[in-house]
Amino acid sequence: MIELTATAVAEATGGTLTASVSPGATVDSATTDSREAAAGTLFIAKPGEHADGHDFIPAARAAGATLILAERQTMDAEGRPDPAVIVDDVVLAMGRLTTHIVQRIREHSPTTVIGITGSAGKTTTKDLLATILATAGPTVAPQNSYNGEVGVPLTVFRAALDTRYLVIEMGADEVGNIEYLSSMVQPDIGVVLMVGSAHAGKFGGVENIARTKGELVESLPSNGFAVLNRDDARVAAMAARTPGRVVWFSVEDGSFPLVDADLEAGTAAFSALADSLTTNADERPEFDLRIGAGTGAEPHPVASGLIGRHHASNITAAAAAAAAAGLSVQAIAAALNGAGSTSRRRMERTDRPDGITIINDAYNANPESMRAALQTLAMMGRSTGRRTWAVLGEMLELGDSRIREHTAIGTAVVRLNISQLLAVGRGARPLYTSAVNEGSWGDEVDFAEDLDAAEELLQGKLAPGDIVLFKSSNGAGLGDLGDRFAHGPVSPGPMDVPTTGDRKEQSQ
């Protein structure tokens, strides 16, 4: 974090200093975790659902924290006030401090701020974009999926005065969230990946999701760039909502003529296209990247380190954003070759010594990402002849569509000819039922009430050669189960293992 005096923190947040604050006190880091506190740290006593940060002020002070951001004054063991900035609302104060820091950095350096949003793919795209931009200058991007009213400030707090590129992931639970996050950081470039049904229950429908995601491009300046997915109709429609210049990205051949027409008409500045898209034997995307005047642009081969054809869209979005930030297509393609996600549990592959392959994609899940992961699993099975397992948990926050969406995924598992299905948890029961109704029976489909039951079943049934996908929303816990199987022992199963071809073909 840039160095700030206690007075500057108080002025930026609209807070007041306690009497115990030393006039010369400065901070150069900030955290909400008392275990990360040290000399020079601003400890942020954030109230939470399960714990109150104010209760951890003594631990933060004992670790050396210089200053506290809090909603009430606290005392040390000797009855003296802790050195603090007192505000009405800590989370809102974090947002105000974020705005102050971004402004200070902009005054010092030619910083480019890039916001990324979408119903799926944000973290992967963020990781890829940070990988590209880091080749051109000091780059700060979120850790893991820091993308909300707390995560965005924590990302910005890691920036220094010489930060050249600041990548901000933006998530939302309701209309207005993205507008608020954008107001904090004032992005120069806004990337919208796709509009899906994630959190549809909270939003009250997909149209409200589209409305919210579009708040990012509405916040752009006239000389900014709105990087939009031409393959998603709801995202493409956001071109009419932005004062910035439009940049298309696309991976679908059918949209390439539309992109070219927009460029010719002057309604888009340039485009990034994934041409001749295919996947290799490991289901990693390979294509010719064309950036500039649509299909007339020079092709640059890209062979990704990510698993799954669906990631081609995220790769191309990152390329488009990097080009909008001023990087050459040669530098972008070079950085993308072999690049994968740096965040955990995003199609994370582990090849065990015993021949079992674990694909842990259980950081999050919605119907769109679930289908994409299953399609990748199916292709891996078809190309290798290995038995495939879909270990699936609940997709959370789907609202009234919960049963319908889980039912559809169970049907998709069968129609994709995936060898084995294990549905885990009561929320995933409709998924299991629909697979049975679609034609799976006997040993092809199982249901486990909880993670322990799932682990016991898998320990007894997995065998060398199996490819096992773990996929669920984060709260369902399958990510931890996937980690245990990636690195832990498996009881040997039957050696006469059926391949994907042993299941009878289903209609598509």
Image: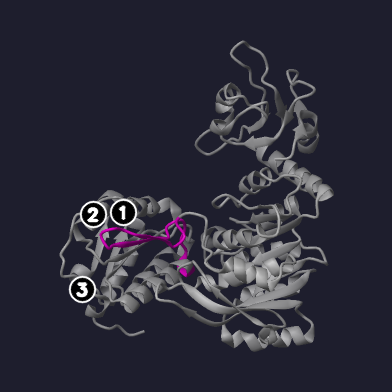
Amino acid marked by disc 3: Pro
Q: Secondary structure at mark 1?
A: helix
- Asked whether the residues under the numbered discs 2 and 1 touch, taking CB atoms below 8 Å apart as contact, a structural biologist would say yes
- Which circle's residue, 2 or 1, is located before the other in the chain? 1
Vertical placement of 74 versus 433: above or below?
above
Near mark 2 (Cα within 10 A), the count class, few <14, some 14-19 or many ≥20, is many
Q: Secondary structure at mark 3?
A: loop
Tell me how many marks there are: 3
**Magenta highlight range:** 345-368
Q: In x, y percent, where is residue 162?
A: 75, 48
- Asked whether the residues under the numbered discs 2 and 3 touch, taking CB atoms below 8 Å apart as contact, a structural biologist would say no
Q: Secondary structure at mark 2?
A: loop
Task: Give me the disc on residue 181.
Answer: none
- Which circle's residue, 2 or 3, is located before the other in the chain? 2
Image side of residue 451 versus residue 212, left or right = left
Distance Cα–Cα, label 2 vs label 3: 18 Å
Q: Is residue 259 shown in magenta?
A: no
Image side of residue 506 versus residue 214, left or right = left
Q: Nearer the viewer, residue 279 or 146?
A: 279
Q: In x, y percent, where is residue 64?
A: 61, 24
Res. 36 in view: yes
Task: Give me the disc on residue 490.
Answer: 2
Near mark 3 (Cα within 10 A), the count class, few <14, some 14-19 or many ≥20, is some
Question: Residue drawn at (61%, 69%), measured in percent from left and top?
Answer: 334
Residue identifier under label 1:
485
Distance Cα–Cα, label 2 vs label 1: 7 Å
Amino acid marked by disc 2: Val
Question: Residue drawn at (73%, 78%), measured in percent from left and top?
Answer: 270
Q: Nearer the viewer, residue 177 or 108?
A: 108
Vertical placement of 300 versus 176: above or below?
below
